[in-house]
Amino acid sequence: MYYTYMIRCKDNSIYTGITTNLEKRMQEHFTKDEKCAKYTKKHTAIRLERAWKSENRVFASKLEYWIKHLSKVQKEELIKNPEKLQEFLSEKIETENYTIQL
């Protein structure tokens, strides 16, 4: 399984990434481990906002790509209402390939 996730940073920005081990990856981001993303090392991750599970890397990467192309307003709306994934991205990806995890 793969996870696509959105993290809130201290400056209120949103980082989006993928992983196979959500718990371990969050630990890396929150502790600024050497394996954390350059972005979260600089912007300080404070909480996991949303995560979706998918069966393979291709699906997870596509979701990550398209979330990164959403506006900040859309990202905030997606965090509040994860069902909006269908509304925002159904023309880009097959949204039924994703299960909300958080």
Image (cartoon, rainbow, N blue to C red):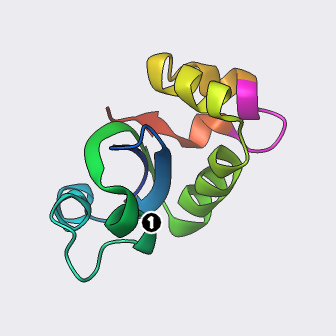
Instruction: Tell me residue 21's x, y (percent).
Output: 25, 63
Query: What element does badge 1 sit on?
Result: helix
* Magenta stretch: helix, strand or loop mostly: loop
Q: State the quadrant of the N terminus.
A: bottom left
State which region is magenta.
88-94
Left or right: 48 with respect to 86? Answer: left
Q: What's the residue type where badge 1 is placed?
A: Tyr
* Residue farthest toward the right in the current orientation of the protein: 91
Query: Left or right of 61: which side holds 36?
Result: left
Q: Is residue 28 above or below residue 51?
A: below
Assess whether residue 92 is covered by the magenta stretch. Answer: yes
**Is residue 40 one of those drawn in magenta?**
no
Residue situated furthest bottom in the rendering: 34
Give coordinates of residue 88: x percent, y percent: 73, 28
Q: Is residue 85 left or right of residue 6?
A: right
Q: What residue sits 30% from the left and 41% below the top?
A: 48
Residue at coordinates 47% horizontally, 26% vertically from top-left?
79
Q: Quadrant of residue 8?
A: top left
Q: Is residue 8 above or below residue 27?
A: above
Pointer 1: residues within 10 angstroms few (<14), some, or many (20+)? few
Residue 36's x, y, as percent?
31, 73
Q: Residue at x 19, y 75 (%)?
A: 33
Question: Looking at the picture, does residue 69 appear above or below residue 28?
Answer: above
**Which residue is at 50% across, 63% downward?**
56
Q: Position of residue 14 (x, y in %)?
A: 48, 44
Query: In this rendering, would 56 be left or right of 95?
Result: left
Between 95 and 17, the one lying in front of the other is 17
Q: Which residue is mark 1?
A: 39
Picture quarter with the C terminus: top left
State the count of labels. 1
To which quarter of the image does residue 41 belong? bottom left
